Each structure stands twice: as structure tokens, then as C-alpha cells.
Image (cartoon, rainbow, N blue to C red):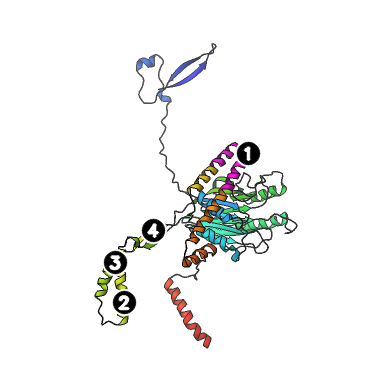
Amino acid sequence: MSISRYRGCRGGTHKRHTIPTIFTGHRLPTTLQKRGFGVNTDNLISIPLVTAHSSTTFPLVRFASWNARSIRAKSKSSSLCDFVIDAQLDVVAITETWLTGDNRDDQVIADIQNTLPNYNFLHSHRRCGRGGGIAILVRDGLHACVNDIHVFKSFEYMDVTISSSTTSLHLVVLYRPPPNNKNKLTSSLFFDEFSSFLEILTLGSTQLLLTGDFNFHVDVTDDRDAVKFLNLLDTHNLQQHVREPTHTCNHTLDLLISREDDKLVSRLNIQHGLPSDHSAIKCLLNICRPGLCTKQTTTRELHNININDICTDIQSSLSLMPLAMDVDNLVSHYNNALAGALDSHAPLLNRTVILRPHAPWYSDTLRVAKRERRRLERRWLHTRLTVDKDIYMDQCAKYKTLLDKLKADYHTDIISQSDQRNLFRVINSLTTRKSSRSLPTHVEAEVLANSFNEFFHTKPVLLHC
């Protein structure tokens, strides 16, 4: 084995000279050493071999933040769900939901819950005035606890602690309305309130993630408010991660902030093409991603029952019924005969079902349109030409129109094929949000049931006293 080196010469050609290299412990023959070849092995040192330890890798939580500018308008809830499914997101922070907190939100929330049954939808509407509002989508397997908030005039926010089996995250989603003559907000008021807010947030030791629409042009280096905002973050040892424009006016308004020492955010990129004037922020969080959630169900394979055989078994069981029995025993014997025949021909089967998003309107046509959209996005990101961006945005609009049409056609077919009984169930599922059944804090269900029984037993007595 030899190492080659080239040396120039006056003739312009290259001559090849070889350097002999020893890679074993054997010495050269003595004759070659006398002729000047060989190596003084005393100059060699032994290098200890270090065994490389394979680092344990695990999937990370996928996070996104998006200013939807009303998820109630123009079927944006469908685009939101499609974005979550396509990117396989675990946590999604949404600003400017424009939810009102009353029954006008039921249809939108029901649509999200039906399409994403394995997600928890948490939201907080603006207390006064229209617009605003914040929501958070959290996939099952991650526990979300909404914390108490302080009321500020210059911004609204939602404070949530997200926990997994190994760690926890303090997530704060914030929206700052731009100051104008109508709301009478000022930048100085925001800095006063936000500075106090950061002092509270940075006291804890839990990993912190602050995201949302701050309405500061942090990409403009000579913007006085933006510079003051970034200096305020630096004072509290916080780092802003977004470096690309997130608004149609080519400014960076939506931010992602964490502690500099946490090393929480990685692989950040901007998702364009969503139906809003803001792009979404996607990234990975250094938190172990939980596996898919499952639930246990029991089923019977009723379609495999032979009607003639089960009828024969029922008749043979009922023929043994003694006629001298009273009514209660006759009913019990009849029920046992039916249950025994059913268990014999279609026994109960325990199955484990993986909870997944429910979007049956996805078709091959929609997949082809999505594939074309991705192709055009890659081309635009490669060339960065305005014409390629316009073509990509046009394809995004076509894809959204096709998605809304296929979804509407699917629900139309379900409604047209439903009888009167199923019709009310379908309409109710499409227009009514699922209410969470909350019980008082308890350790054992039996103790809670006994306390309910005692309360309702003693209440009439107390009323008559």
C-alpha cells in the first residue's frame, strides 16, 4: 500500500512518486533497510482503539404553530385537519381562531373532533371584542393541563403544561394584536407587561416554549421595537429560532422562543400554502414522542352466523323449558337460551384498536393533487422564483377546493343514505361538539358512587326539615 503525491516539473507534466507506507508490525528485510528503505519504528506510537457507543435515538415530538386568521371561515378547519394529518403533528398551537365561546363554535369544533378523534382540542376565546382567540391541539399520549393565566391588556395567551412519560413542557401560546387607534394599545404598554410576564415564566426549571404571533418585524434590523423585543429576550436568556418570513408581506411575525440552554428546538422549517396570510412553523421538540394510543373493544362476527343453525339451537333450548315455572324464571331461561346460542355462534372477541384520524373522503384524486402540490413546492424552494411561487400557490388553492368538495360529497352521501333514525345521529355528530364527562376528583370509583348515593338519599330529608 502506498500514498501517491504529485509534483510539478518545468516541462508542465506531472511525475508520480510513491511513498512506501507500513500498516503492519512486520519489518522490511535487512537488505531493503540497508538501501535506505524502511521506517524507524521507534518513532511510531500505539493508538488505543476506542469502542464507539451507539447513542440511543428516539422519535421526537412534532410541533407546529400557525396563525389561522379564523378557523371558522371558508372551511379552514378542514385545511387545519389536513395539515395535522399530512405532517403527523403531535402538538399544534393556533392563534387568531376567532372562536366566540358560544354555540356558534359547535360546528367547527365538532368537525375537528370528528376528523381528529385522537386529539384533544383546547381553546380560549377573546373575552371582549371580536377576533383573537387561541387553541392548542394535543395528540393522545401527551397529557395537557391548562394553567391559570394573568390578564394583560396588550396581549392574550394560553398557558399549558404538556407532560409525557419522561418529561414535561411549559407551552405558552401568545397573540399580540397590532396597536391601532381603535384598541388604543401601545408598544410601551406591551413591553411593560411582557417584561413582567417573562420574569414569571423564567422562574421555573421546566423546559419552556413560547410561540405565537407577536406582530414585530424581527427581520428588520433597524426596527426600534423589534430590536428592543429581541434584547428583552436576550436579557432573560431566551432564543428566537425563526429566521424566515412567515407573513405574505415577507416579514417574520410568528416566532418560536425557548431557553438557550434547553436545546429544545431542531429541524425548523416554514410550511407555506395554508389558507391564511401567515405561514405555519414546523419543528421537532427534544421530547420523546409517545406511541400510538389504543383502546380495547369487544366485537362479534355476526355476519358469519348461519341463521338456520342458530334458530335450531334456540328451538332446542326453549323446548326444554318447564312450563310450571313462574314468569321471572321463564324470562331468565329465555334470555339465557338466546345468550347461549349467540355466544356459541358468534363469541365475543377482544380486539385492540389503534386510534387514528378519521378522514374517509381521502381518495386517489386527492392524493394525486397533494403529490403535485409537493412537487411544485420543491421546485419553488429550489429556484425561489416568483413565477414558481405563483404556480405553487395556485395549486394549493386548487387542492383546498378539491378537499372541500370531496368532504362535502362524502357527507352528502352519508345523509342521503341514512334512514330517519340514523339521520339525527349523523346531523348531531356534524353539528354538536363532544362534551367531556368530568367527575369530581376521586381515588376509587366505588367511593365516589357511594358519595353520590348518600348525597341524593339525604337531600330530600334535608329539604323537608
Q: CA distance from mark 3 to mark 2?
A: 19 Å
Q: Say which amino acid is labelled 1.
A: Val
**Looking at the image, is mark 3 or mark 2 earlier in the sequence?**
3
Q: Which residue is mark 1?
A: 387
Dot label at residue 332 = 2
Judged left or right of residue 43, residue 162 is: right
Q: Measured from the top left, where is residue 219 in percent x and y?
A: 66, 44
Q: Say which amino acid is labelled 4.
A: Thr
Q: Which residue is mark 3?
A: 310
Judged left or right of residue 368, residue 328 is: left
Numbered disc in front, either 4 or 1? 1
Q: Tell me where residue 93 sits by quadrant.
A: bottom right
Under circle 4, the secondary element is strand
Q: CA distance from mark 1 to mark 2?
A: 77 Å
Q: CA distance from mark 4 to mark 3?
A: 28 Å
**Looking at the image, is mark 4 or mark 3 earlier in the sequence?**
3
Q: Which residues are magenta?
A: 374-398
Q: Which residue is mark 4?
A: 352
The one nearer the camera, 72 or 158, is 72
Is any part of residue 270 visible from this angle? Answer: no
Q: CA distance from mark 3 to mark 1?
A: 69 Å
